[in-house]
Image: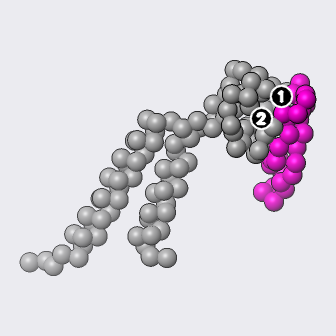
Amino acid sequence: MRKSNAIQHLLVVGCLSACTTWEVQSASPQQVLTDHQLAKVRVTRTDSTTLVVKEPQIVGDTLFGIGQSNSSGPEHIDRHAIALTDIDRIAIRKTDATSTVLVGLGSAALAGGIGFMIWASTMPED
């Protein structure tokens, strides 16, 4: 991979991670999942353990989904069924528009600065 491609990839990854945050919802899990079409949610159980659940859906009094707990390794992914009474809070991913703009502008300035330094280093000295 060329150096410029590596820099571009690094900037994109930085932008993506800086632009979203988990926002705890005050509504019940049933209401949150009814109001939003969500690919994933972060569940905090009453015992304070957290779990990111992909493809969340409520059937009866249980939240089902695919997830990975903080205590298990990255290769340990399985189906989860969590009783709604065991859920302390639920959070959803939110995009922060201000952070998105600031990170985008900062990335553009950084890329421009790097480009200028590369250009200036190739200029012949008089």
Stretch in magenta: 58-87
Can you identify the residue that label 1 sits on?
87
Can you identify the residue that label 2 sits on?
43
What is the three-letter code of the residue carrying label 1?
Ile
> How crowded is the residue under tag 2: few (<14 C-alpha within 10 Å), some, or many (20+)?
many
- Residue 38 percent coordinates (x, y): 69, 39
Is residue 86 in view? no
What is the three-letter code of the residue carrying label 2?
Val
- Residue 87 percent coordinates (x, y): 83, 28
Vertical comparison of 69 with 44: above or below? below
**Residue 93 highlighted magenta (yes or no):** no
Is residue 118 in view? yes
Give left or right: position of 115 versus 7.
Answer: left
> How crowded is the residue under tag 1: few (<14 C-alpha within 10 Å), some, or many (20+)?
many
| Residue pictured at 37% horizontal, 48% vertical | 106
| Residue pictured at 35% horizontal, 59% vertical | 111
